[in-house]
Amino acid sequence: MQILTRLRSSLQRLIATISGAGDVRVEFETPPRPELGDLATPVCFDLARRLRRPPRSIAEEIAKTASETGVPGAARVEVAGGGYLNIFLDRNAFLSELISGATPLPVLPFTGKVIVEHTNINPNKAAHIGHLRNAVLGDTLVRCLRFLGGEVEVQNYIDDTGVQVADLVVGFREIERLDLEGVRRLALSCDEAESSGGRPFDQVCWDTYARVAPFYEEDERRLKLRAETLKALEDGRGAGAEMACFLASRMIRHHLRTMDRLGVRYDLLPRESDILRLRFWARAFERLRERGAIRLAGDGKNRGCWVMDVQGTEEGAGEDQKIIVRSIGSVTYVGKDIAYQLWKFGQLGRDFFYRPLDWADFPWSGYPVWQTCSEEGKTQHPPFGGASRVYNVIDARQSYLQRVVTQGLRALGCSSEADASIHFSYEMVALSPASIALLFPDHPLSDEDRQRPYLEMSGRRGLGVIADDLIGELERRALAEVERRHLGRPAGEMTSLARGIAMAALRYYMLRFTRNRVVAFDIEDALSFEGETGPYCQYAVVRARNIFARMREREGVGRESVAGQVPDVARLQGEEGFEHWGLLKEMSRLPEETAAAVDSLELSSLARYCHRLAQSFNTFYHRYPVLAEEDPQRKKLRLVLCDLFIKTMETGLGLLGIEAPERM
RNA sequence: GCGCCUGUAGCUCAAUUGGAUAGAGCGGCAGCCUUCUAAGCUGCGGGUUGGGGGUUCGAUUCCCUCCAGGCGUACCA
């Protein structure tokens, strides 16, 4: 709010004059109780130290001067507690600024193009709830950055030449005894059977993948199959590579469909195979070698590998060796990622070819997604890469690898790029023992396991909650509830409402927790539509909308009738005044809450803000009738509050990827 | 061993980055639908913020030290 900006600077000037301290920074907080004021600043506690005077007496002097000269935007300034300065705002001026929408958005603390990389599911199995946390965090960050005026490109990296895909190929060829044609037929039959409840192909792949680990354990010599297949994938040669290519493209299709159900979309899918084919890696390798950042290990356990010496976080910590190129010549993820990061910043001196995804393969949707390719790209395509800032949404278990990548960038002289490459780290999603017992009754749980707070998911052991299963269950439950309330509405409308509610429940659940907390997935919590959930927030909006719908029925006019109206909020006194005014103040905070969430990468704070707002509205709704209010001034103010609430929530929930529905 | 993270109400989590009386949701108990949708609202009960030191006007937050748990430290990612 501009009012707040002006208020801050005039207070700072005033304090400078009084105290003689020039560089005072006034920070605003919210007092614990609204009667104490609209804003509070503890600035006098800092001044007390510098001026060697009691904070209370400084505060009193400032408040006295402020009331004599007046501070624009403030109705009055008071002293409270040990030396807080509490400020009461000029309510009408504040409301009028809020309604006019003239407040400029907070500016991002950086300029230029931003790349957000997220989702990055290995293309060998179905998406699970851990991937959902990644995608929802990434997508929410993207929405917030765009809201604040950022130019954002969303990338979903396809690791199609990694060990996990190689393992799947081994699984199909050696265990299932299928060739490419066989796998193709299997995929097709899965697609056909899906509509009648058959197991989708991505889940079938997960089953096969889970059989590979025991297959290796039975006979360790079989690990040779993995190494050979991996090398073949990298070189892009042979039947294994062909199968991997097919599998990866099919998995991408499934992942995009799953994410589209949550409103998560991408601009570009960079493929690791293209990084190799187009010799991005070869180039990065040469530069790393020239700089001495990597060296060929001549002896020891890493003999024959190209390794990077990794510095510990602090001095004196031991040095690790990270293998960048394996002894058989294949490249690890870290190596490929260094090349990829260089390209993102436009520091590689090479570019991909690009082609749009074939929408014939994606009948459920139709937004434009580009994919990298190694040859015959379209000549016309959006400019990709060349960012000045990059967010890599990757879970905390990969912190070590991310540090190695960053160190690689620095070794190549790209220090500023390393600084601008941000690991958006978050903790994993695990399963509570209770959820495992419920969802995987056949899975053996030791007594020790039952005592733990949570257990890690494992694709290799087939232990994980599949995203599509969870979304499906949410949609079924939401639909049942919608049908109960809106019998008689067109089926298509009810399905669409249910989808929006399911999405809200899931996205809110994934955002509720601060990012460095392990989410111990609880199926009952995740499926809930009550309490601190997305649907609760939606419901509050629906109630506000209903007021206007009912108004149109009764009075012939709706929301449009309050547009531009600025009622007198200053004349409201007592509890009613405080509550109406409190709701207004809270609603005005959306832009700064968003900026704070982006700044700290703590997106849970924005989710909680929306929930708090919904709570405040529900209290207001319960206490104060709007349409039945007889005093026209009061009624007008309440209608304006409802209108602002809808607007704020549409924006706020929109940032979380949650729609504000017409009805529920 | 070393590095990172976590420990707050019965359970799941917050706490404006050092601020005023530590708050929400779930669960429990007691109420509220002839009123703008009860996916809601109101009330009650629930706390030595893992333990112990320190720093200061002031600590859940910062420092030290124990204790407990998780993750990482792979020729997986």
Image: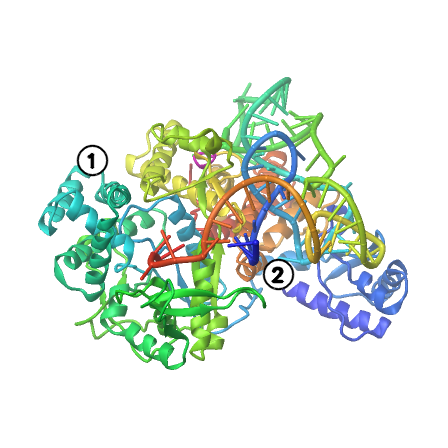
**In terms of secondary structure, what is the magenta stretch mainly?**
loop
Q: Secondary structure at mark 2?
A: helix
Q: Amino acid at mark 2?
A: Glu
Residue at the spot of label 1:
A198
| Mark 1 nearby-residue class (10 Å; few <14, some 14–19, many ≥20) | few
Q: Secondary structure at mark 1?
A: loop
The stretch of residues the image draws in magenta is A525-529
Q: Is residue A292 above or below residue A236?
A: below
Nearest the eye: A14 or A545: A14
Q: Is residue A190 above or below residue A437?
A: below
Percent x, y for residue A390?
Answer: 44, 67
Horizontal placement of A375 versus A1: left or right?
left
Residue found at x 41% / y 70%: A308
Q: Chain of mark 2?
A: A
Q: Is residue A435 above or below residue A351?
A: above
Task: Determine if the magenta segment contains residue A527.
Answer: yes
Residue at the spot of label 2:
A97
Percent x, y for residue A286?
Answer: 32, 79
Nearest the eye: A541 or A52: A52
Q: Amino acid at mark 1?
A: Gly
Task: Determine if the magenta segment contains residue A286.
Answer: no
Horizontal placement of B45 versus A48: left or right?
left
Q: Earlier in the sequence, mark 2 or mark 1?
A: 2
| Mark 2 nearby-residue class (10 Å; few <14, some 14–19, many ≥20) | some
